[in-house]
Image (cartoon, grey):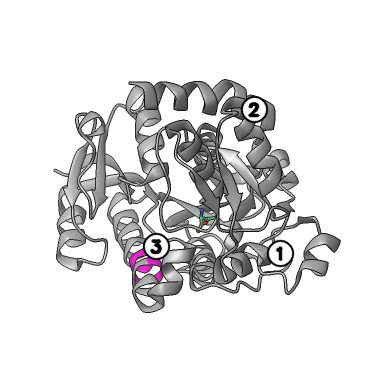
Amino acid sequence: MRKKAILITGAAGEIGDALIHRLADSYSDEILTLDLQPMNAEVSRKVTHMQGSILDKSLVDRLVSEYEFDAIYHLAALLSTRAEFTPDAAHQVNVGGTMQLLELAAQQSQWRGEPVKFIFPSSIAAYGLPDLDTKHAHPQVREWEWNDPTTMYGCNKLYCELLGGYYSKNYKQLSAEDPIMVDFRAVRFPGLISAFTVPSGGTSDYGPEMLHAAAQGVPYAAFVREDTTIPFMAMPDAVDALLDMAAAPRENLSRVVYNVTCFAISAAEFRDQVLKAFPEAEITFKPDVKRQGIVDSWPMDTDDSLARKDWSWEPKYSLERCFVEYLVPNIKNRYTD
Ligand code: AKB
């Protein structure tokens, strides 16, 4: 008899950490986590952890034989900057890994006779605007606009969105009456900021890095220009977005991929927020050509009106609340312990 569980891949990463903290309080079945890294001690008490790769077919087959998954949160990915250094590895993990898990979900669904929810964090990196003039002329992009990513990670995310749509709408479906096997749902996240973890390998990392460095009293040189503008979101809102989208009745969803956003802010405005909390912070700007090019190709903001309409998405942390109520107090706590 298979054990009922939800599966979280890439569970030791930033979103995984926050998602597990939230799910552990509300979810009664087992939470099975999969990551190349061990889980941190606090989280590992709440989950059954498998340390390994999503590309390891025999490990994934073992999971299929032992567990029945209601939902898969597929968070494992190599982020945008890192993927530019190792595009082949990024493709294997980001696309090959996703494909393997979509197959797993389809197999599980056949045995269960019920769809498996497949929740996928996509990214603002799925967009690619050709130059800064175009970026300024289109300050809030819709899901179907400017889908011309300039990075391997962005290409991987966009393609996996399409793959997910294929598995949920066309895979082994001979007629519209055939049941859905993989209930794939994706959100395109902006840059995420957590008070408890520091990102690595991404290109939106300059925001959180600035803040965490300031809280530790360490000088920081941001790798972008001061005027660089992209949207950001507090990690608790990102977790809400995943859970709210997962909980939405299928019939309410008009798309498989939704934008979610919170506040668009320039790197200089980000620095000003950090300085309000840490007036002694030493923050400078030293743009890196490659990473600057990546964020310049991302939109200033996205239009998330469809998520608001279809599943009542609404972020709780505006710019002000994000810093004053979530980031600053928790980060001060974290580095004074
Ligand atoms: C990255 O910078 O690669 C990620 C993202 C925006 O998806 N944080």
The residue under the point 83% across, 68% down is: 133
Callout 3 crowding tier (Cα within 10 Å): few <14, some 14–19, many ≥20:
many
| Prevailing secondary structure class for the magenta stretch in the rendered image | helix
Q: Tag 1's secondary structure?
A: loop
Q: Disc 3 on helix, strand or loop?
A: loop
> Residue 220 location, x and y as percent?
51, 47
* Relative height, residue 303 to residue 243 (above, below): below
Picture residue at 54% right of the left edge, 52% below the top:
221
Three-letter amino acid code at the position of disc 3: Leu
Q: Is residue 86 left or right of residue 165?
A: left
Callout 1 amino acid? Trp
Front label number (3 vs 2): 2
The answer for how far apart the CA atoms under marks 1 and 3 are is 24 Å
At 49% from the left edge and 64% from the top edge, which residue is drawn? 80
The residue range painted magenta reads: 94-99
Q: Position of residue 208 (x, y in %)?
A: 51, 43
Disc on res. 144: 1
Residue 22 appearing in the image? yes
Q: Which residue is labeled 3 in the image?
A: 78
Q: Of all residues shown, which one is farthest toward the right? A: 137
